[in-house]
Image (spheres, rainbow, N blue to C red):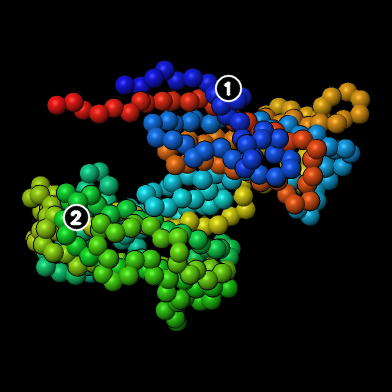
Amino acid sequence: MIIDSMDLSPRTGRLFSPAGRIDLAAEKLGTFGPVPEGVVYEISGLHVYFEMADIEALLATGDGPLFQLLTRKEIVPGLTLDPYAHRMHTIAGREDFTAGSLKGGRIEAVDGRDALCAFDGKELDWVSAVYTLRQSTEFSAAYWDLLPSRHAGGFRYMLAVDVWTCGADPAPSTGHPVVLAPEWTTPDQARANDAAAWPEDITSYRLRFRAQSSGQGRLSASSRLGHRDGISRALLRSVTLAETVDHSFTFHSLLELAAASVDGGFQPPHGPARGYSAGIAYAATLEEGDGLSMRLGSAFSPDLFQAHLVGVEHQRPGHRSEG
């Protein structure tokens, strides 16, 4: 059962300060969420309005931001990131898997997606190609996609990233290891890591994956595609590294704010301006546990600041089975 979807009202989509006020100016913080169970918000925009003296001076870029919109989104179970503050590097598919070295296994399509598969009774050892980045990069988290239990059965594995910094040549060295999943992690443990110690200024990296299978989770004979190397076990489909980037919704001036807005401007539109309104083009799907916050810059001191989301609310009521 799904209750009819409804547009968010300005009150329902309002961001509130920690003290429950709609004016965020004094506390410099407003939040929305976390989203409760059974509710999904399809957000299509954000409207802000603020007032202060000499507001036209904000056309110039200052030392700090006016405000920043931060999104809390569960990317995978156990890993919450701001999608507007990260760029994802996904290593997956036959092209990536074959570019490196693979021992004790092969690549097969399982449920329509390529996966690393271990041969029966052998340890799989895969090392990816070395990926060189165009500029120095900072990673902050990673997550990986293992095969569902009906395919993976029992196995244990390790996953690590070798990184090189400051333009170092990866050829003569092994790189700095960043362990994402230590020996011997099992599939029922977390498949994400946001606590690893990443060095700064990463310019190259490669992945290392090693797995030992228990002999369960074999592919069917129809998946063997004529190979004579024995039955295989499907293990890994992808690894994604989250790169930290400049935040898309951090505004340092009214010019930056106007560039990201679909409507708005000085208020009143004629005569001495006292306020500014902006309808920001912002899109997000917020589900259970997700939310967002608005942080005002320390040097930005408006007399009034209000914000509310624009979008649609979907509800699915809870239920329990009888009998």
Q: Which mark is residue 131?
A: none
Residue at disc 2, secondary structure: helix
The answer to whether any part of residue 197 appears in the image is yes
Q: Residues within 10 Å of mark 2 (few under 14, many from 20)?
A: many
Residue depicted at x 66% and y 30%: 47
Seen as rendered, the residue at the extreme bottom is 172
The extreme top residue here reads 4
Coordinates of residue 33 in the picture (x, y in percent): 52, 38
Mark 1 Cα within 10 Å, few/some/many (few <14, many 20+)?
Answer: some
Q: Nearer the viewer, residue 240 or 39?
A: 39
CA separation in Å, label 2 and label 1:
46 Å
Q: Along the horizontal axis of the image, is 242 left or right of 254? A: left
Q: Quarter of the image holding residue 183?
A: bottom left
Name the kind of residue labelled 1 in the image: Ser
Residue 192: horizontal and vertical position, in percent? 38, 57
Give the x, y percent position of residue 195. 45, 64
Q: Dot 1: what SS?
A: loop
**Rendered residue at 42%/52% (across/down):** 79
Instruction: Say which residue appears at 19% left-offset and 62% top-offset.
Output: 155
Residue at the outermost front position:
19
The reply to whether callout 2 and callout 1 are in contact (CB within 8 Å) is no
Where is mark 1, residue-wise? 9
Quarter of the image that includes the C terminus: top left
Q: Which residue is mark 2?
A: 152
- Which residue is more in the foreground, 22 or 216? 22
Query: In the image, is residue 202 above or below residue 272?
Result: below
2 or 1: tag closer to the N-terminus:
1
